[in-house]
């Protein structure tokens, strides 16, 4: 089921009031860059000045100021993935992290409204874990090539073909795929999830490369699917080796959504937060991040003395989330993320099993 199909199905089911009807609409604030706004956002500009030129800050600052004010007024919390742009990540987010951290933190959030700055499956995961809360995504079209690669019907066919084989599904999937799943995983816990299962054979779907990478670390037989991340599949081992040849001191760290040939030339592979922690702990003199490039900027803003090489592959879906759209979410309570009650219970169970897994 695509995002549009899912939202249409849920919309058809729901006769309940919309979030705008429940919370009301606010008036658009004046977005003039005043001396007061300059003063109150100066500490935030300091965090992103490497990435936002001084002459552009007067455009960003009124949005940052308004979002931070309205967030309190609405009682909302902003969860942002590590791939969000530095203005979002460093200036308006309350909680940042990789997919697993965001899923875990979503269960601890006090606020009644969650604004998910990331892609749709992340917002849907937050909603599954917080059925009573209002979850908004600033752009509901923020999809994911992995999530689009498989449907619940596909998983049902796989289960018919491999009866009794447990299904481990990457969180980068829609709720209707999760509903057919035994347990979810992310790139940071995929090995632990697979090892937690008794079966010698496991379906690890839909990311073929993640499955091939984890297959090298376990004795279990891993069956998979042909889904790929459109950002990480573009990296090649040849281009990384060319960097290494030009400067053998470079440390290369990559995301397990890359092809195994790419991971083979990496010094470290891990989830987005795994990569951030590696750089923070090891402080390599020069590092090449084989992942979405906003993340390198986000660490660069915090870590001094590390030279970052950023082959700039952007995720077009993550980049749909912008400050003006976050402001609109807060003003108009859009776009609300709902999950079809017919699948929500089963999908929630698969996510909860992952979140509760002891590691
Ligand atoms: P992480 O779980 O590592 O944050 O990955 C999410 C993602 O979409 C990477 O492309
Ligand atoms: Fe999906 Fe890849 Fe974008 Fe992550 S980077 S959201 S896996 S398309």
Image (cartoon, rainbow, N blue to C red):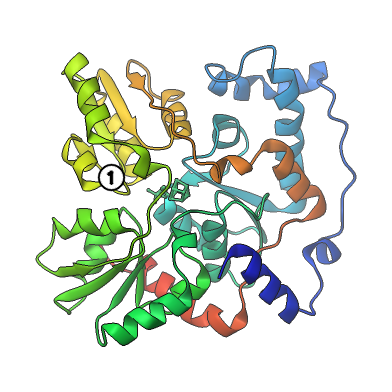
Q: In the rendered image of this protein, does residue 44 appear above or below residue 135?
A: above
Q: In the rendered image of this protein, does residue 11 appear above or below residue 90?
A: below
Q: Residues within 10 Å of mark 1 (few under 14, many from 20)?
A: some
Tell me residue 2's x, y (percent): 57, 66
Q: Which residue is mark 1?
A: 270
Q: From the viewer's side, name the closer residue of 324 and 291.
A: 291
State the quadrant of the C terminus: bottom left
Looking at the image, residue 144 sits to the left or right of residue 334; the answer is: left
Q: In the rendered image of this protein, does residue 194 appear above or below residue 295?
A: below
Quarter of the view holding residue 63: top right
Q: Is mark 1 within 8 Å of ligand 1?
A: yes
Q: Residue at x 35, y 44 (%)?
A: 233
Tell me residue 59's x, y (percent): 74, 23
Looking at the image, residue 181 sits to the left or right of residue 21; the answer is: left
Q: Residue at x 70, y 71 (%)?
A: 8
State the quadrant of the N terminus: bottom right
Outermost residue to the left: 219
Q: Residue at x 18, y 34 (%)?
A: 267
Looking at the image, residue 89 sits to the left or right of residue 247; the answer is: right
């Amino acid at each position: 089921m695509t995002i549009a199909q899912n939202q249409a199905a849920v919309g058809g089911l729901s006769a309940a009031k919309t979030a705008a009807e429940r919370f009301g609409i606010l008036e658009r604030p004046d977005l003039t860059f005043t001396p007061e706004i300059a003063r109150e956002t100066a500490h935030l500009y300091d965090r992103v000045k490497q990435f936002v030129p001084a002459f552009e800050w007067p455009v960003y600052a009124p949005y940052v100021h308004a979002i931070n004010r309205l967030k309190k007024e609405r009682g909302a919390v902003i969860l942002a993935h590590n791939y969000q742009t530095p203005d979002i990540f460093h200036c308006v987010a309350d909680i940042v992290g990789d997919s697993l951290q965001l899923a875990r933190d979503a269960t601890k959030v006090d606020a009644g409204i969650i604004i998910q700055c990331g892609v749709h499956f992340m917002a849907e995961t937050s909603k599954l874990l917080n059925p009573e809360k209002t979850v908004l995504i600033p752009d509901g079209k923020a999809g994911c090539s992995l999530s689009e690669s498989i449907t619940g019907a596909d998983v049902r066919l796989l289960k018919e073909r491999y009866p009794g084989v447990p299904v481990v599904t990457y969180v980068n999937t829609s709720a209707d795929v999760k509903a057919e799943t035994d347990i979810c995983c992310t790139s940071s816990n995929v090995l632990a999830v697979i090892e937690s299962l008794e079966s010698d054979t496991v379906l690890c779907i839909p990311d073929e490369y993640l499955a091939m990478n984890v297959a090298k670390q376990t004795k279990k037989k891993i069956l998979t699917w042909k889904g790929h991340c459109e950002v990480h599949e573009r990296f090649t081992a040849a281009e990384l080796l060319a960097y290494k040849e030009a400067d053998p001191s470079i440390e290369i760290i990559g995301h397990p959504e890359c092809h195994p040939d790419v991971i083979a030339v990496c010094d470290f592979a891990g989830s987005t937060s795994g990569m951030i922690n590696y750089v923070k702990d090891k402080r390599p003199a020069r590092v090449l991040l084989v992942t979405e490039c906003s993340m390198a900027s986000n660490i660069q803003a915090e870590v001094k003395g590390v030279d970052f090489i950023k082959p700039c592959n952007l995720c077009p879906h993550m980049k749909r989330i912008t400050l003006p759209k976050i402001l609109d979410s807060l003003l108009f309570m859009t776009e609300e993320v709902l999950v079809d009650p017919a699948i929500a219970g089963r999908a929630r169970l698969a996510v909860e099993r992952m979140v509760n897994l002891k590691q």
